[in-house]
Amino acid sequence: MVLRNTIADLYERRFKRIEITEDVIFDYHDRTVAIMERKFESTFYPPLKKFILLPKSYDHYMADPEFNNALSTLQSYRRALFTRYDAVDSIANEVQLMIRTETKSDD
């Protein structure tokens, strides 16, 4: 019963939380890019052979509350996502161990 509950927890709760956090991250990533497209300058970067966005003034953007808020929020959600990945990894390892133990006892 413990094995079944642990697997159910993974699929019904843990993976869902990861999916929701990933969706929020994609949303904040899009918001951050939109800010950068409005406020940064598109410049061709020869080593990459493509255009990149560069701030017109680093000091200005270091103090820009909209840009800083978007970046710090994105960073916070990414940290939360990595924490959730680690928890799922740990639980998945436990499930593997439980399965091995249960299948050995059935032999």
Image (cartoon, rainbow, N blue to C red):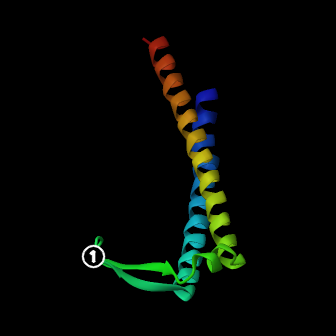
Quadrant including the N terminus: top right
Q: Please tell me whether mark 1 sits on a helix, a strand or a loop.
A: loop
User: How far from the left and from the top, in percent, is residue 56?
Assistant: 53, 84
Q: Considering only vertical position in the picture, is 29 above or below 18?
A: below
Q: Residue at x 57, y 81 (%)?
A: 57
Q: Nearer the viewer, residue 44 or 38?
A: 44
Q: Considering only vertical position in the picture, is 82 above or below 74?
A: above
**Residue 31 quadrant:** bottom right
Q: Residue at x 57, y 86 (%)?
A: 39
Q: Residue at x 62, y 45 (%)?
A: 83
Q: Which residue is mark 1?
A: 49
Quadrant including the C terminus: top left
**Residue 72 quadrant:** bottom right
Instruction: Using a 10 Å C-alpha cutoff, classify the residue at mark 1 as few (fewer than 14 neighbours), some (14 to 19) or many (20 or more).
Output: few
Q: Residue at x 58, y 82 (%)?
A: 35
Q: How many marks?
A: 1
**Residue 36 quadrant:** bottom right
Q: Considering only vertical position in the picture, is 105 above or below 67?
A: above
Give the left or right position of residue 80, taking residue 101 as reference.
right
Q: Nearer the viewer, residue 101 or 28?
A: 28
Residue 1 seen anywhere in this rendered image of the structure = no
User: How far from the left and from the top, in percent, is residue 48?
Assistant: 30, 71
User: How far from the left and from the top, in percent, is residue 50?
Assistant: 31, 78
User: How far from the left and from the top, in percent, is residue 103?
Assistant: 45, 19
Q: Considering only vertical position in the picture, is 100 above or below 13?
A: above
Q: Nearer the viewer, residue 68 or 92?
A: 68
**Given the image, on which type of amino acid does mark 1 rest?**
Lys
Q: Nearer the viewer, residue 56 or 101?
A: 56
Residue 86 seen anywhere in this rendered image of the structure = yes
